[in-house]
Amino acid sequence: MKTLNKILALSVIITAMFAFMACDDDEAGTRKPVFESITLSPKVTTPGENVTLTINIKDKGNNAYIWRSEFAWVNKNDPKDKYQLSLLKEMSPITLYNPSYQFKAPNNPGTYTVSITPKIAYIAGDNLYDDGPTLTAELVVKSSTGGDEF
């Protein structure tokens, strides 16, 4: 009888362990946001003008926020014409589906690939950190004198 009770208790413990391991992130209190794309407004601009980058989020997740982002742009015609910045601007928690950043357009005319990689933190128990995907969009910078010059 003691052996049967031990086996029964052990099977209950093993079943509970498998049930716990089968829980998805949502049941555990966190769920990673689902990022779709970025939008630039305007898509065509002149040097030094303000551009708004909006992160399009399909699912804002659960107990998650963007704690910083890696931002960059590079000129498609001149790879040496580039810029990188680690943005420490928090968006906590992700309550909006489309958080945005504002930046100045590059000084040189050209077609640029703009990218951002959101860094995610979760507000559940211990803080957990994760990288979102790198999202890209194209920005065209035209000469302020009227000619394209690129």
Image (cartoon, rainbow, N blue to C red):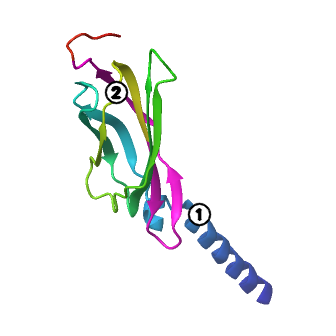
Amino acid residing under circle 2: Asn
Residue 1 appears anywhere in the view: no
The residue under label 1 is 21
**Local crowd size for mark 1, using a 10 Å CA cut-off: few (<14), some (14–19), many (≥20):** few
Tell me if label 2 and label 1 are in contact, CB under 8 Å: no
Left or right: 6 with respect to 119? right
Q: Of the residues under marks 2 and 1, which one precedes in the sequence?
A: 1
Q: How many numbered discs?
A: 2
**Magenta stretch contains residue 136:** yes
The prevailing secondary structure element of the residues shown in magenta is: strand
> In this view of the protein, which residue sits in the foreground, 145 or 142?
145
Q: Where in the figure is residue 107, as x and y percent of width and height?
A: 34, 27
Which quarter of the rendering shows the N terminus? bottom right
Residue at the right extreme, as displayed? 3
Q: Where in the figure is residue 3, as x and y percent of width and height?
A: 79, 84
Q: Where in the figure is residue 119, as x and y percent of width and height?
A: 47, 51
> In this view of the protein, which residue sits in the foreground, 75 or 15?
75
Q: Residue at x 56, y 66 (%)?
A: 19
Q: Secondary structure at mark 1?
A: helix
Q: Quadrant of residue 110?
A: top left
**Magenta stretch contains residue 46:** no
Q: Where in the figure is residue 129, as x and y percent of width and height?
A: 52, 58
Q: Residue at x 78, y 89 (%)?
A: 2
Q: Quadrant of residue 10?
A: bottom right
Which quarter of the rendering shows the C terminus? top left
Q: Give the label on residue 107, or none.
A: 2
Per the rendered image, the range of residues in magenta is 117-144
